[in-house]
Amino acid sequence: MATHKIIHPILFLALSVSATVIQPRDLTIAENFVLADCGIGTLPDPSASTSREVIYYPGDVWNKDGSTNRPTMMKNVPWDGSYPWRESGVTVTMPNGDEFTATVTNAVHDPQWAGGAYHSYDGMGFNCWSFHKERLYQLDDGKWCSSAFVCNHGSAPDGPVQPSPGPAPAPQPHETVETTFSVNSDMVRIYDNNHHAILGMVDRVTQDGRNCDETGMDVGSGCRISFECHGAGKASVGNMADALKNQVANSKDFATYETDTTQICAVYDTRPGHEGECRSYKDKIDTYVTMSRKISLAIDNIPGEGSSDNPSMQALMQYEITCEKGTSMSCLACKMIAAGMSAIAADSFLWAGPGATMNAVCNFACT
């Protein structure tokens, strides 16, 4: 299929004006903006949606096996009396301040060219394609979003598409949730701290239910901890943080503690001729905690038997500790931590449903 280079006249004018005031920066050729309809099939009108979202992907939206990648930004488009994916255009401001404008028509079939778009980041134009595909992304309230249009710098997306929204789809085979913990074999040893306090620092960086501030925070001994979070549906950042602070932190052998005892002077002599001498001593007890340098929590949707859907990652949370003095490797400690977390009940997580499964594995060089 030939790539269309036609841009809507209104959009072309906007692009011409924008080009005079914006200095182009690095263009992400593979980026995609998806105009999505969410909650289809949950209202009395089976073709109606409960919300409309502009979803940004820095790379491909779908993989070759049909699974979806994780977006990095999303913006809700409030209802203003008419369907926002329209020829009169719609403009939204993304969470990073980038203004995105799309002008599309609904009078074409998948996967035909439907219009154009541009964003203020670099003023470069997008081709927008009619492309209806279900189960693109799951919102925090559990509703699924379906793509309506995909705007990119190239040709129409590949892969099978659904017809434009019609009757509600038949019930899908029962889907389950799989929770997987991956433990790093590198261990860190930190002075005068405890693992509950260290993992509890996740509360300082949780943001909007979907992401975390990844800025590192000091935990002592020249070490810093950072968190990476991507929440979705019931597996929100808050729910994953609760699991990290409770079930994970309380699991058997998650951390080990050591104490070093040394004698220090309690009372110095002040008598003439004896200045600086120690008259009595006391014990000084130093405590160290040893824990895995990095643990990740991945939550995947597993389609039921007979489903045509592919497994897809729903959410992720991980912490990573970096230390100036480096780390020490211990496969034994790694396996003990994983074994302790394996005892956590799969249905104890707030995102778990019927048939949920859980496993913990020691990765990174340990077999």
Image (cartoon, rainbow, N blue to C red):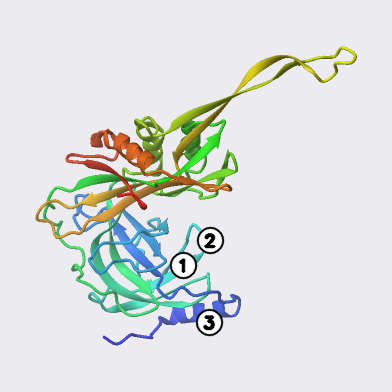
Mark 3 residue type? Ser
Q: Label 3 belongs to which residue?
A: 16
Q: Is the residue 281 above or below the residue 118 in the image?
A: above
Which corner quadrant holds the N terminus?
bottom left
Q: Identify the residue at horizontal 38%, vertical 39% (top origin).
A: 333
Q: Earlier in the sequence, mark 3 or mark 1?
A: 3
Q: Identify the residue at horizontal 46%, vertical 81% (top origin).
A: 12
Please tell me which residue lies in front, 156 or 220: 220
What's the CA distance linking mark 3 and mark 2? 21 Å
Q: Label 1 belongs to which residue?
A: 100
Q: Total label count?
A: 3
| Residue 80 image offset from top left, x and y in percent | 39, 58
Q: Secondary structure at mark 2?
A: loop
| Residue 157 image offset from top left, x and y in percent | 29, 74
Q: Is residue 152 left or right of residue 353?
A: right
| Residue 207 image offset from top left, x and y in percent | 48, 45
Please tell me which residue lies in front, 310 or 9: 310
Q: Is residue 15 left or right of residue 343?
A: right
Q: Residues within 10 Å of mark 2 (few under 14, many from 20)?
A: few
Q: Quadrant of residue 254?
A: top left
Q: Identify the residue at horizontal 39%, vertical 37% (top origin).
A: 244
Question: Is residue 336 in view from this perspective?
Answer: yes
Q: Which mark is residue 97?
A: 2
Q: Quadrant of residue 107?
A: bottom left
Mark 1 residue type? Phe
Q: Earlier in the sequence, mark 3 or mark 2?
A: 3
Mark 2 residue type? Gly
Q: Is the residue 54 above or below the residue 31 in the image?
A: above
Q: Quadrant of residue 265?
A: top right
Q: Nearer the viewer, mark 3 or mark 2?
A: 2
Please tell me which residue lies in front, 39 or 294: 294
